[in-house]
Image (cartoon, helix red, strand yellow):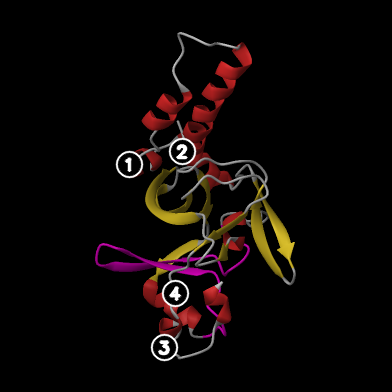
């Protein structure tokens, strides 16, 4: 069972109890909530629903929306805490390759750097469309930064895809998300570390 289906299932049980009108001999909703746990990282790496989402790039419950001149992502349905919403999708390159790309940009763009053991790895969602989905919009690249209002966090997994194991960043809900909520995560960037310059980057304070 996927992260999303697990979170959805706990709410479905409550709805069934209400719909049936049961008043006795049923689990209490608070007991269901207390016992529910999201999938572990190891389970997520082989979960068929997550693998399908990463492979096909068809994640349900999300839409790209314009916020002034900037695009962002909103929820079109509710997600429970611990749900996986989508992945940050792009070509997996080395950290050195990613930093070489970043040097040519005026702002950070859609490059996500992370450590795996001693190695620095980068997922390049800046190069669009991606090689594996040339005709699809990869929605994770539109999830914007917010330090104060972040409601998802990236979770690194090595997904067992058909073409072999692959580094994947999954966006996991850090709180319950309501329909029409904007989806944001903290990029973890500080002004002093952005290209090594002391700049007034107001978007980092949002």
Question: In front: mark 3 or mark 1?
Answer: 3
Query: How much space separates mark 4 and mark 3, taking CA atoms?
Result: 11 Å
Q: Earlier in the sequence, mark 4 or mark 2?
A: 2
Query: How much space separates mark 1 and mark 2, taking CA atoms?
Result: 12 Å
Quarter of the image where the C terminus is located: bottom right
Which residue is at 57% across, 46% downward? 177
> Residue 29 versus residue 164: which sits nearer the camera?
29
Residue under label 4, please give it.
Answer: 189
Q: Is residue 119 magenta?
A: yes
Q: Earlier in the sequence, mark 3 or mark 1?
A: 1
Question: In front: mark 4 or mark 1?
Answer: 4
* Helix, strand or loop status at disc 3: loop
Query: How much space separates mark 4 and mark 2, taking CA atoms?
Result: 27 Å
Query: How much space separates mark 3 and mark 2, taking CA atoms?
Result: 38 Å
* Helix, strand or loop status at disc 2: helix
Task: Work out whether 14 lies above or below 143.
Answer: above
> Residue 156 versus residue 90: which sits nearer the camera?
156
Q: Is residue 15 magenta?
A: no
Q: Residues within 10 Å of mark 3 (few under 14, many from 20)?
A: few
* Pointer 4 with pointer 3, Cβ within 8 A: no
Residue under label 1, please give it.
Answer: 42
In the image, which residues are magenta?
Answer: 104-131
Q: Residues within 10 Å of mark 2 (few under 14, many from 20)?
A: many
- The image quarter in which residue 19 lies: top right
Q: Residues within 10 Å of mark 1 (few under 14, many from 20)?
A: few
Residue under label 2, please give it.
Answer: 3
Q: Earlier in the sequence, mark 4 or mark 1?
A: 1
Residue under label 3, please give it.
Answer: 196
Question: In front: mark 4 or mark 3?
Answer: 4
Would residue 68 be found to the left or right of residue 13 on screen? right
């Amino acid at each position: 069972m996927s992260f999303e289906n697990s979170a959805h299932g706990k709410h479905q049980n409550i709805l069934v109890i209400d719909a049936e009108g049961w008043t006795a001999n049923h689990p209490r909703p608070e007991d269901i909530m207390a016992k529910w746990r999201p999938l572990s990282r190891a389970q997520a790496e082989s979960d068929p629903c997550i693998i399908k989402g990463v492979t096909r790039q068809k994640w349900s419950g999300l839409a790209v929306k314009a916020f002034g001149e900037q695009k962002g992502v909103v929820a079109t349905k509710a997600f429970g805490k611990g749900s996986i919403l989508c992945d940050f999708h792009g070509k997996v390159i080395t950290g050195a390759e990613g930093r070489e790309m970043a040097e040519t940009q005026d702002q950070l763009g859609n490059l996500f750097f992370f450590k795996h053991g001693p190695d620095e790895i980068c997922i390049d969602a800046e190069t669009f469309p991606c090689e594996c989905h040339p005709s699809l919009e990869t929605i994770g690249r539109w999830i914007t930064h917010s330090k104060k209002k972040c409601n998802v966090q990236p979770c690194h997994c090595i997904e067992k895809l058909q073409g072999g194991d692959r580094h994947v960043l999954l966006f996991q809900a850090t709180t319950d998300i309501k329909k029409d909520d904007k989806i944001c995560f903290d990029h973890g960037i500080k002004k002093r570390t952005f290209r090594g310059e002391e700049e007034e980057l107001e978007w980092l304070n949002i």
